[in-house]
Image (cartoon, rainbow, N blue to C red):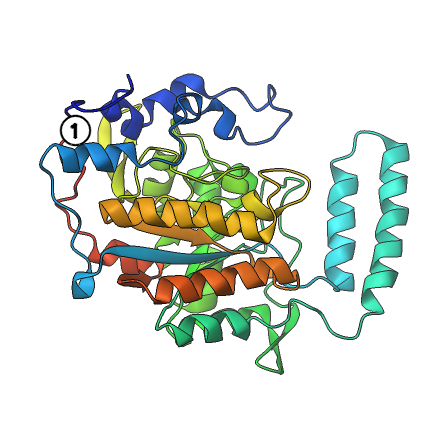
């Protein structure tokens, strides 16, 4: 790929293949067991994190913009990671507490967790109505703008437990559309209405194909058909291992490659592309639809950008405009478990309303992937 007219020394082929990330990725021990984030990204160091430099170089070299249905200027991919299904569930709180105790090395700390967990359980179960038991609000808001999204649900079982694992089960109950559903029934209902169900696998699946298949199978048993889309929980992903694991597990689309603590273009592009297997030096049949904007990265008060609602919207408008210029895909992630936080819901609603007034095409991960031509704009990257 030509580098003409570019004010940087970044090799774009190396960038999209994931070689920069592989070279700069620290061990998890070095970052305290967390996922390495934007600080290790080569584009951040060059001040280019919010710029789709790969897409711009493609266009400046004579490439064409992607073609979207109805000749839309760009595409929007809506997604939701379902990390929790209830805030006031005694059963889930007990599981969560047991999980924390299991991962504590100190007996004293384990006892403190047990006491705190018991107090949380009593306090939460006194609540009459769970504030996140209104999943239909997401569907209603999206239906108003003729859109459907992908809901990434977690499995209920894992053979390799981790402290970040989900604490809900498919048999747990929620309120959906004013009626009591099990989580499994709600998943099937969302699927039946035309929204996509994807897998949000646990921490220890990123390099384990058998565990990933096990978790994929659980969700497939619930919906009664194949699951084709995936996003790793906590975005726990190793570019040297995870692409190959996803391919062997039978996924078609991934949308993990974004940030937990920032927004922007992790690989310098808003265009979907076939992810690369660095070990075997080949493209895979996994189409990466990069994550561009995550709610928590902007709005959390204890990490990330720590923005207020107004400033977060300004950041988003800049990225929306950049995606529009290159005709790419704006992938948004909003967590259903934060719907009770009014600034988070207002920002989602305001953004959705703004986007609905633009010349766009909106879809789920599978929708975007199925419309994407095999002759991608990144065709010059081997």
Query: x%, y% of residue 3?
Result: 18, 22
Left or right, 197 with respect to 178, comes to: left
Q: What element carries label 1?
A: loop
Of 21 and 73, the residue lying toward us: 73
Report the residue at 37% width, 29% height from top. Answer: 48
Left or right, 221 with respect to 95, comes to: left
Of 169 and 145, the residue lying toward us: 145
Query: x%, y% of residue 92?
Result: 72, 58
* Screen quadrant of the C terminus: top left
User: Is 246 placed above or below 364 here?
Assistant: above
User: Is 200 placed above or below 176 here?
Assistant: above
Answer whether residue 230 is visible to the viewer in this image: no
Answer whether residue 190 is visible to the viewer in this image: yes
Instruction: List the residue tagged with mark 1.
Output: 382
Report the residue at 49% width, 43% height from top. Answer: 211
Left or right, 25 with respect to 288, comes to: right
Q: Splitting the image into 4 quarters, where does residue 353 fall?
A: bottom left
Q: How many labels does the image show?
A: 1
User: Is 178 placed above or below 203 here?
Assistant: below
* Screen quadrant of the N terminus: top left
Query: x%, y% of residue 210?
Result: 44, 41
Report the residue at 28% width, 32% height from top. Answer: 53
Q: Splitting the image into 4 quarters, where does residue 304 fall?
A: top right
């Amino acid at each position: 790929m030509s580098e003409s007219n570019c004010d940087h020394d970044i090799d774009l082929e190396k960038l999209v293949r994931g070689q920069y990330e592989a070279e700069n990725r620290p061990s998890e021990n070095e970052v305290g067991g967390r996922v390495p984030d934007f600080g290790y990204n080569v584009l951040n160091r060059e001040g280019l994190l919010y710029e789709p430099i790969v897409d711009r170089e493609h266009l400046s070299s004579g490439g064409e913009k992607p073609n979207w249905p109805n000749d839309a200027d760009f595409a929007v991919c809506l997604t939701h990671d379902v990390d929790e299904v209830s805030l006031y569930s005694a059963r889930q709180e007990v599981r969560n507490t047991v999980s924390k105790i299991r991962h504590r090395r100190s007996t004293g700390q384990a006892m403190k967790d047990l006491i705190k967990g018991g107090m949380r359980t009593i306090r939460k179960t006194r609540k009459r109505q769970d504030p996140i038991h209104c999943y239909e609000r997401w569907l209603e808001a999206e239906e108003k703008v003729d859109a459907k999204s992908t809901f990434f649900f977690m499995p209920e079982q894992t053979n390799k437990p981790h402290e970040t694992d989900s604490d809900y089960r498919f048999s747990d109950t929620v309120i959906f559309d004013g009626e009591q559903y099990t989580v499994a029934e709600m998943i099937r209902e969302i699927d039946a209405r035309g929204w996509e169900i994807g897998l949000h696998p646990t921490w220890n699946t990123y390099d384990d194909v058998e565990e990933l298949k096990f978790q994929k199978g659980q969700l497939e048993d619930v919906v009664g058909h194949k699951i084709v889309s995936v996003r790793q929980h906590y975005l726990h992903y190793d570019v040297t291992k995870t692409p190959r694991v996803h391919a062997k597990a039978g996924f078609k689309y991934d949308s993990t490659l974004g940030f937990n603590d920032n927004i922007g273009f992790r690989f310098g592009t808003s265009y979907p592309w076939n992810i690369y297997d660095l070990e075997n030096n080949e493209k895979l049949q996994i189409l990466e639809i990069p994550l561009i904007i995550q709610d928590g990265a902007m709005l959390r008060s204890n990490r990330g950008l720590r923005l207020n609602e107004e400033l977060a919207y300004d950041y988003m408008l800049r990225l929306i405009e950049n995606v529009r210029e290159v005709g790419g895909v704006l992938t948004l992630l909003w967590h259903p478990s934060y719907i009770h936080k009014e600034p988070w819901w207002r920002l989602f609603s305001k953004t959705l309303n703004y986007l609905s007034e633009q010349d766009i095409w909106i879809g789920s991960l599978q929708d975007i992937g199925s419309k994407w031509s095999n002759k991608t704009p990144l065709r010059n990257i081997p």
